[in-house]
Amino acid sequence: MARGIDVDAVDAVVSYDISALLKAHCVRRTARVSRAGQAVTLMFERQRSHFQRLMAQAGKADGRVRETPVPLYELRQYEATYARHHSSASMAATVEYPPAEFCRKYGRLLAPNGALLRPQRAFAAYKGADGQVREKTQKAFKVTLKRLRRSARVCVVCGKPAETTLGEVTGTCRPCHVFCCDTSCAAEVSTHQVLCVSLEHQFLDQVIECLPAPLNLFTHLDFSKSGCPPSGLSWNSWFARQPRLTAALQSAAAVAHEWCSLAGMSPAPSVEEVRLCLQRITTGLVSLPLTLVRALHVAGLKHKTVDIHMVGADLPEVSMAYNGLCRLACGTGVRCARITLVSPDENVRAMAKSAPPSRPLEAGPCQVSAWDGLYHVFHEALVETGKLNPPHLVVCIHPGLHTDEGFASWRPTLELLVQKGYPVALTTYNEQEWTATLQRLAAVQANVGESGENPVRSQHVKQTPKDRRLVWSANAYFISFQGERAA
């Protein structure tokens, strides 16, 4: 690493890889052996014994080596910065999601004024060249569809792409486009049947995602009818209370259907299938605020003004605040919601600069603010000092408690919430996460109340890229807890 490099005035050397055998030698050469300085080595707990052996071999096991344990939850605040730098460094190797790429390239052509045009109107603007523009757009749309089909050609059992299984291909299931590479994998009928039901509409949903602005959701929402109806909250009951939105979905489906015909889809979807697709995508947008409505209903909160803390918030929660969808949380029994987003996420950090708790953002009957940091620090700094009211409800959207790292970073917050006895609602992406999350909550003695499938889960279902056997949707499962479980 540093052999042959002569660097003056080095005060500190930071190492992040202790696998090299001559680590101490490298540090000395980098920092110039005759001068004083500090050497910091970053490592996991499991690497300590290896590091201690290296220090003993170098004659440095004499007490001058100081260990500083760092809890995982303290590192979480740096994840966003790392992810940002890492993504920019590897941008060249990143493959853009095909629908997003098509929208980016052809958005101004298909929706020049922020609303999707019919193909005839979109091409009419290019007088004299409309035929060429139409041909180019049609070709690009077809290529995007081929890329989507190719991305689905990964075996759900063994994970091998179709290109590596030439001569063994069993085929793709027509209803769900799930791929099995050979007869042995295709024999996993149970795995396939679960995916077939969940992913039946995934391909059409991805095709419609290619179209920019097929529906202006916000101009058709009736925010006065967002509360929980007496019969209980469900998608059927909610859409029944949104007649303007229902009519707009029908009109948008007719336009989107013309673009599907242009792409030459086979089999071609009907207008009704496209309408149901747009409805599924809409549920993905409004699932978050309606999950808040359900959480308020489960907690029995009918105060005129409620204080809600959304912990571990990131881009979806910030978007909900800025686009005004948070207003859907105000309905039956709730006239004003004071929502505080708390997280070390970079999106929350940016919002906290313009809308801190002392200067919240006004969004109709809602006041939304943000605080950059971990919740137990926020609670100590603002709630325990009386600067903010204690929450009537705490909401954690997809906290990731099912992983060891996620649970370790959340444990101080969970223990605080259990101790304070605040009503808490959290969601997970799928059944596997839900089952593991319940086990984590048992470990902190949480008194779990209502738990199971969320009736207002997003119906926009997708495959997990890292494991094709797992499917997910936003807010798929709901868990509520309050206080400590009785012994």
Image (spheres, helix red, strand yellow):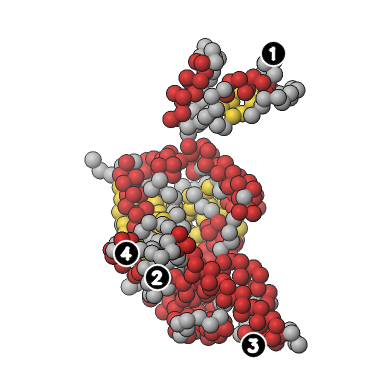
Quickly name the residue at label 1.
34
Q: Earlier in the sequence, mark 4 or mark 1?
A: 1
Using the numbered discs, state the Cα–Cα distance from disc 3 to disc 4 in whole angstroms.
46 Å
Residue at the extreme left: 487
Name the amino acid, label 2.
Thr
Closer to viewer: mark 2 or mark 3? 2
Cβ–Cβ under 8 Å for marks 2 and 3: no
Quickly name the residue at label 2.
172
Q: 222 or 391, which is in the foreground?
A: 222
Q: Secondary structure at mark 2?
A: strand
Cβ–Cβ under 8 Å for marks 4 and 2: no
Name the amino acid, label 1.
Ser
Placement of the C terminus among the 4 image quadrants: top left
Name the amino acid, label 4.
Thr
Name the amino acid, label 3.
Gln
Using the numbered discs, state the Cα–Cα distance from disc 4 to disc 2 in whole angstroms.
12 Å
Q: Where is residue 431, by image quadrant?
A: bottom left
Residue 195 x/y as whole percent: 35, 65
Q: Residue at x 55, y 56 (%)?
A: 315
Q: Secondary structure at mark 3?
A: helix
Quickly name the residue at label 3.
120
Vertical relation: 395 (above or below) 406:
below
Residue 17 x/y as whole percent: 55, 31
Q: Earlier in the sequence, mark 4 or mark 2?
A: 2
Q: Earlier in the sequence, mark 3 or mark 4?
A: 3
